[in-house]
């Protein structure tokens, strides 16, 4: 019987090639997208799932309760020691200090053996907490020693080729010689831990005494603290027990810390602490579901309208003894065959699109990953679900056809599924498409708003060139003077970071003038020389710029500080003294600048002070003239290499850096555009098939109308008006849904674009035009046909 079902199914599908191809193509696109989306979701769900005792591994993070709550994926450097010595909750605790793009070179300083690598200063117990296995080790030596390191296989091959790396040395940042005492397996891509070299924490003393000494004075965003708890611990109870630790070590600070334990499997999905937005996985999954739903709706609509042509076949089968269940499963078998072929094509689509998908979402999925057990299990389940749900309704409709009416040709629309059902399904397709179109427009407007809006500083033709840490003042001044003399350079400044560099945000506490206590808010620190204000085009609105100096004695602040202090005007700030960083620095306010966006648009404008301090300069910002930029860049590189011959030259443009702060949103926008287009295309496929069949049913009516003098425009209106009405109904339903979701999404931004009425009109109007074009092709073809031929078909 099953063999007979499939044989008949093949015959029926072969007989209706056009509709079969439309159904297969629509389902294939849905399957292809679903496979890629499932692979994306599965990729992220596998982060850090390979560690031993993963259920007992936690990262300790900080909630900073100031005038508002800020979240840091770090703790004070002294926390780890206090947690293991003062409490009995943990078996192991370890600090990890992460630095991106540090230079590693060979002992001879060979230019071909210099690499920029992500490195980490690690305490020994880190490798007892997380599972990063050693392949080889030098005797019984450990990371307790200074100037030793574990490196990955990848870095070992890069630096030493096929030679054994154990016992060999490299130079870190041209200062410290480090010996390799262990080789690790390459760090998996699906982990929140990044690094190619793990250097002993003792070595950190040469680079950051603040971190190494275990201070409680503040938090460095590059420090991470991991712990392996003892079994069966109560996390909420531990967090409550840690509250007195704050009073013990930070008794006078108004920046009150709350230390939280973050489970290992939560780290990757918590956007507050530098993870991804976990809601995106749900959004992706829903989009995959909607695309499959649209394809299934196409199948149901086309199948039910075909009931007219198959009614005699069904009537004859029933007269010859066919029962409803046999007819139902026959149609399910047809649906399964279509879905199976669509699935094969969907896999081909996924394989072809995989490189672009990886590039768009910064993944490393391989073709093999599309055929692992989880993906195969998912697509098999999806195949069965699509076959059943897409085939059930048409199967039920066909199975219940009354044979006497079918053989006499007296079936009505209600006998074959009804117009109302098809209209509801088509409207559902339009609702999904309109929501996606509106979302895409709003996301694009917000990103464009963030990237192109006046940020309060100049970013055009501004290049940021990195400089080595602890640079000698004379070298820096000499390099700056030579850069300023280049014809393509307008101005330059040495600084800690650019004005809008959210990734290098540095905050500290202040005490204002004669007030007794420190303020509850933090002030953003912009360490820079006296040319910073002119180079970035910041607007000085009161007082003067600070004088050139190697240390902080004078500061320039922004207008926002006056607002946070509750002053009636910014002029009141001039001449006042402020204590900075727990009174380690005392300075006078000599100038006030207009507010600028020191962080991305997710956050508000902070109070800021700008002051000189040579030891904190990380880069030179160079304002260039608009012409001959490439020539100027080459000249800057040559000068830089003369001053720093042992370092790798690095630069980037400020406008690209700012745009990079919205990389996640850009990917989300690309995803929205892609899937909106696919949703519309799949819907149009269904409309094309549906209108083709409906016009075939109206052949006689169209011929009669033309004989009686009907115009082409009248016939076109007759065919298209119902579909345009459905678009308008869908727009009325989709608009409040889209507004609700996108309004909530925009709440993530302190500065955001408006949701204007024309966005909804554009989405509905655009879809109306697309629908009209899709439907009109077949309608015009029928309208211009010779009515004699149309009537002869009867």
Image (spheres, rainbow, N blue to C red):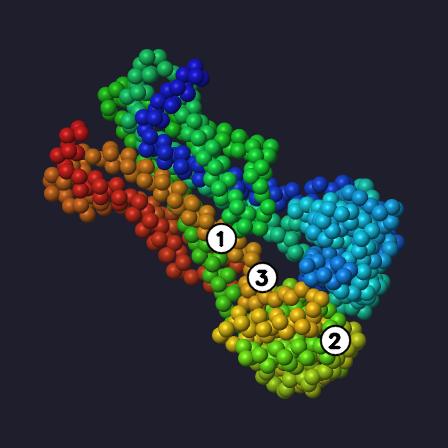
The kind of secondary structure element at disc 2 is loop
Q: In this view, does 728 lie above or below 793?
A: below
Residue 272 coordinates in the image, percent (x, y): 65, 56
Answer with left or right where residue 783 lies relative to residue 493: left
The circle drawn on residue 472 is: 2
Please identify, in this view, whether the residue under mark 2 or under mark 1 is nearer the observer.
Answer: 2
**Residue that label 3 marks:** 661
Residue 290 coordinates in the image, percent (x, y): 47, 42
753 or 177, which is in the foreground? 177
Q: Is residue 611 visible in this depiction of the protein?
A: no
Precedes in sequence: disc 1 or disc 3 = 3
* Label 1 crowd (10 A; few <14 / some 14-19 / many >=20): some
The circle drawn on residue 42 is: none
Q: In which quarter of the image is the N terminus?
A: top left
Q: Residue at x 78, y 49 (%)?
A: 165
Residues at badges 2 and 1 in contact (C-beta under 8 Å)? Answer: no
CA distance separating discs 2 and 1? 45 Å
**Residue that label 1 marks:** 670
Q: Residue at x 54, y 50 (%)?
A: 359
Precedes in sequence: disc 2 or disc 1 = 2
CA distance separating discs 2 and 3? 31 Å
Q: Which residue is drawn at 18% across and 36% down?
A: 701
Q: Which residue is drawn at 72% across and 82% down?
A: 549
């Amino acid at each position: 019987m099953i063999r007979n079902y499939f044989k008949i199914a093949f015959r029926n599908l072969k007989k209706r090639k056009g509709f079969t191809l439309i159904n297969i193509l629509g389902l294939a696109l849905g399957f292809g997208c679903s496979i890629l989306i499932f692979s994306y979701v599965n990729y992220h769900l596998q982060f850090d799932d390979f560690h031993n005792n993963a259920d007992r591994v936690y990262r300790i993070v900080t909630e900073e309760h100031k005038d508002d709550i800020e979240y840091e994926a770090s703790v004070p450097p002294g926390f780890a020691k206090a947690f293991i010595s003062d409490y009995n909750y943990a078996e192991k605790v370890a600090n990890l200090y992460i630095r991106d793009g540090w230079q590693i070179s060979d002992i001879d300083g060979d230019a071909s053996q210099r690499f920029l690598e992500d490195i980490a200063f690690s305490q020994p117990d880190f490798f007892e907490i997380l599972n990063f296995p050693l392949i080889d080790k030098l005797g019984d030596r450990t990371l307790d020693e200074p100037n030793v390191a574990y490196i990955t296989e990848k870095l070992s091959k890069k630096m030493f080729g096929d030679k054994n790396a154990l016992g060999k040395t490299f130079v870190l940042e041209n200062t410290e010689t480090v010996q390799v005492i262990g080789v690790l397996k390459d760090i998996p891509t699906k982990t929140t831990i990044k690094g190619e070299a793990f250097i002993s924490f003792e070595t950190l003393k040469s680079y950051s005494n603040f971190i190494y000494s275990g201070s409680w004075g503040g938090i460095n965003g590059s420090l991470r603290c991991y712990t392996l708890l003892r079994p069966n611990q109560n996390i909420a109870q531990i967090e409550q027990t840690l509250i007195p630790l704050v009073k013990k070590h930070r008794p006078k600070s108004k920046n009150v810390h709350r230390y939280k334990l973050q489970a290992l499997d939560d780290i990757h999905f918590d956007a507050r602490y530098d993870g991804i937005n976990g809601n995106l996985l749900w959004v992706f999954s829903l989009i995959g579901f909607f695309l499959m739903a649209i394809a299934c709706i196409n199948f149901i609509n086309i199948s039910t309208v075909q009931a007219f042509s198959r009614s005699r076949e069904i009537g004859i089968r029933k007269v010859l003894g066919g029962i409803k269940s046999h007819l139902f499963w026959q149609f399910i078998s047809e649906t399964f065959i279509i879905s199976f072929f669509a699935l094969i094509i969907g896999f081909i689509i996924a394989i072809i699109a995989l490189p672009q998908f990886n590039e768009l979402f910064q993944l490393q999925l391989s073709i093999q990953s599309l055929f692992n057990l989880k993906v195969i299990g998912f697509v098999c389940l999806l195949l069965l679900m699509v076959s059943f749900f897409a085939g059930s309704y048409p199967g039920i409709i066909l199975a219940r056809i009354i044979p006497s009416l079918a053989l006499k040709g007296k079936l009505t629309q209600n006998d074959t599924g009804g117009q109302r059902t098809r209209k509801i399904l088509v409207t559902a397709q339009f609702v999904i498409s309109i929501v996606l179109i509106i979302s895409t427009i709003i996301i694009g407007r917000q990103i464009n708003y963030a990237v192109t809006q006046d940020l309060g500083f100049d970013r055009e033709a501004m290049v940021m060139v990195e400089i080595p840490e602890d640079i000698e003042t004379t070298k820096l001044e000499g390099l700056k003077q030579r850069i300023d003399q280049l014809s393509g350079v307008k101005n330059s400044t040495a600084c800690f970071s650019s004005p809008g560099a959210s990734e290098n945000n540095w905050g500290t506490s202040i005490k204002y003038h004669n007030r007794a206590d420190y303020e509850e808010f933090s002030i953003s620190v912009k360490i820079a020389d006296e040319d910073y204000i002119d180079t970035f085009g910041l607007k000085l609105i009161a007082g003067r710029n600070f004088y050139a100096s190697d240390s902080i004695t004078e500061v320039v602040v922004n207008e926002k500080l006056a607002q946070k202090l509750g002053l009636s005007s910014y002029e009141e700030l001039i001449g006042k003294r402020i204590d900075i960083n727990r009174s380690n620095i005392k300075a006078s306010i000599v100038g006030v600048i207009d507010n600028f966006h020191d962080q991305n648009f997710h956050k508000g404008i902070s109070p800021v002070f700008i002051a000189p301090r040579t030891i904190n300069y990380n880069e030179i910002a160079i304002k260039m003239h608009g012409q001959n930029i490439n020539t100027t860049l080459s000249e800057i590189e040559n000068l830089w290499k003369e001053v720093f011959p042992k370092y790798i030259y690095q630069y980037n443009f400020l406008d690209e850096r700012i745009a990079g702060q919205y990389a996640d949103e850009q990917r989300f926008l690309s995803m929205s555009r892609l899937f909106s287009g696919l949703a519309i295309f799949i819907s149009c496929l269904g409309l094309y098939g549906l209108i083709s069949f409906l016009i075939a049913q109206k052949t006689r009516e169209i011929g009669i109308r033309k004989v009686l003098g009907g115009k082409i425009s009248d016939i076109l209106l007759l065919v298209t008006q119902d579909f345009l009405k459905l678009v308008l109904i869908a727009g009325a339903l989709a608009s409040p849904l889209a507004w609700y979701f996108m309004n909530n999404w925009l709440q993530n931004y302190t500065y955001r674009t408006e949701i204007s009425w024309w966005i909804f009109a554009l989405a509905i109007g655009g879809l109306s035009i697309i629908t009209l074009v899709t439907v009109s092709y077949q309608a015009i073809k029928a309208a211009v046909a010779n009515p004699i031929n149309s009537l002869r078909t009867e």
